[in-house]
Amino acid sequence: MKTVKKIIVLLCGLGLLAFFSACESEGPAERVGEDIDQGVEQLGERMDDAGEEIREGVDEAGDRMEEAGEEMQR
């Protein structure tokens, strides 16, 4: 009975070792997934930057319209 327990413990240990070693290696799909994540993150940053530029342009246009309205009232 002790031999069976030792074999079971050994097999469980080997199974865990195989499981954890498989988690460390990256396959091509994982690398592509990481590349996609990075691309999406960069796209989001660029969209944020573009949105900020648009906001600044709209604010500037609003300021100019206010100035034009004040000029018209004079």
Image (cartoon, rainbow, N blue to C red):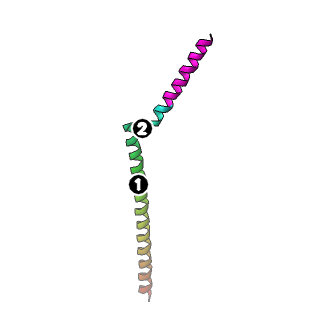
* Relative height, residue 33 to residue 15 (above, below): below
Height in image: 27 above or below 14?
Answer: below
Residue in the foreground of this view, choosing between 30 and 51: 30
Q: Please tell me which of labels 1 and 2 falls first in the chain.
A: 2
Specify the amino acid type for callout 2: Glu
Q: Name the residue at 48% across, 28% down.
A: 18
Relative horizontal placement of residue 28, taking residue 20 as reference (left or right): left
Q: Residue furthest bottom?
A: 74
Is 7 in front, or is 56? 7
> At numbered mark 2, what does the secondary structure look like: helix, strand or loop?
loop
User: What residue is at 50 percent from the left and 32 percent from the top?
Assistant: 20
Can residue 11 be found in the magenta stretch?
yes
Magenta stretch: dominant secondary structure = helix
In percent of width and height, residue 13 lies at 55, 24
Task: Give the residues drawn in magenta, as a range.
Answer: 1-19
Q: Which mark is residue 26?
A: 2
Q: Label 1 sits on what residue type?
A: Gln
Is residue 20 located in the magenta-colored stretch of the structure?
Answer: no
Q: Secondary structure at mark 1?
A: helix
Task: Indicate the position of residue 39 as horizontal and vertical percent values.
Answer: 39, 50
The location of residue 57, given as percent across then percent down, is 40, 71
Depth check: 27 or 74 in front? Answer: 27
Q: Quadrant of residue 4?
A: top right
The answer to whether 9 appears left or right of 70 in the picture is right
- Residue under the point 52% across and 24% down: 14
Packing grade of label 1 (10 A; few <14, some 14-19, many >=20) is few
Which of discs 1 and 2 lies nearer the camera? The answer is: 2
Instruction: Measure the C-alpha gap from mark 1 to mark 2.
Output: 22 Å
Q: Which mark is residue 42?
A: 1
Residue 6's tag is none
